[in-house]
Amino acid sequence: MKYHFNNKFILIILSILILFGSLAVLANYNKTKEDTLMTDKKVLVAYFSATGTTQRLAERLSKATGADLFEIKPERPYTSADLDWQNSNSRSSLEMKDKNFRPSIANKIDNMGSYEVIFIGFPVWWYREPSIIDTFMESYDFSGKIVVPFATSGGSPIGESGENMQSLAPNAKVYHGKCFSANVSEDELKNWAAEWL
Ligand SMILES: Cc1cc2nc3c(=O)[nH]c(=O)nc-3n(C[C@H](O)[C@H](O)[C@H](O)COP(=O)(O)O)c2cc1C
C-alpha cells in the first residue's frame, strides 16, 4: 500500500514537471517568434551610410528580420568637407548634380544570386538616393528579386528614389520604400518589413 502511494506521487510530480517544461518551451518559442520575423526567404539588408544614422537603422532592421547585413563602402570615404551640402562645389554636391555620376564601391557581395528580398538603405541626399546607390544597382543582376528601399533624412521623404532604382534594375521589382525617423523601433521596422517576407 505504501509502495503504491509513492508510485502515484512520483507520477503526479512527473506530470507537473512535464507540464511546466512544455510551457517553458512554448513561451520561449513565442518569444523567438516575437523578436525575429519568421521567414523562409533569404533576405539581405544592404546599406550606405555616411555618418552612421542609416547604419544604426540597418542594423536594427537586419536584427528584426534575421537578414544578412552588408555595408556598401565607398572606395573613397566621404569626409565632412565632401558632405558639405551648403558648398555647391563639395564632392557630394558635384556628384549629385550629375545623374550619371557613379562613385566606386570598395566591396562586393559574392552570393547576391541567393537573395530573394533585398532591403537597400541610404541617407536622402538632395531629395533622392545618393549616386553610390545607383552604382550598387548597376553592379548586380537583380532579376526576379524584390528590392525595398529605406532611408533616413533631415525631414525629406524618400522621393523618387525607388523609381530611380527601378529604372536601373528593370528586371527587379523595386518598391517605393520609406524614409524613417532615426529612432524608429525594431518592432516598427519588423511590422513594416513583414509585407515582403
Ligand atoms: C550631401 C547631403 C545632402 C542631404 N540632402 C538632404 C535632403 O535633401 N533632405 C533631407 O531631409 N536631408 C538631407 N540630408 C541629411 C541626411 O539625409 C541625414 O542627415 C541622414 O540621416 C544621414 O544619414 P547617414 O548618417 O546614414 O549618412 C543630406 C545630407 C547630406 C550629407
Image: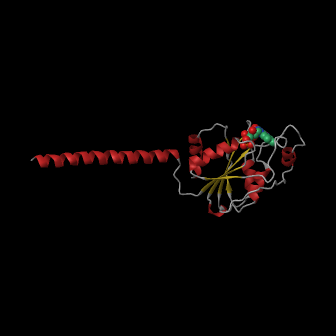
* Residue 41, percent from left and from top: 56, 57
Q: Residue at x 21, y 47 (%)?
A: 10
Instruction: Spot the residue most to the left.
Output: 1
Q: Quadrant of residue 20?
A: top left
* Residue 115, percent from left and from top: 62, 59
* Residue 17, percent from left and from top: 30, 46
Q: Quadrant of ligand 1?
A: top right
Q: Quadrant of residue 54?
A: top right
Q: Residue at x 75, y 60 (%)?
A: 139
Q: Residue at x 76, y 56 (%)?
A: 106
Visible residue check, residue 21 = yes
- The reply, left or right, for residue 49 in relation to residue 79 is left
Visible residue check, residue 126 = no
Instruction: Spot the residue most to the right.
Output: 89
- The reply, left or right, for residue 5 in relation to residue 131 is left
- The reply, left or right, for residue 48 in relation to residue 65 is right
The front one of 23 and 119 is: 23
Q: Residue at x 73, y 57 (%)?
A: 107
- Count of marks, rendered view: 0
Compared to 190, does 104 lie above or below? Answer: below
| Color scheme of the displayed model | secondary structure
* Residue 163, percent from left and from top: 73, 51
The front one of 107 and 29 is: 107
Compared to 17, does 102 lie above or below? Answer: below
- The reply, left or right, for residue 59 in relation to residue 170 is left
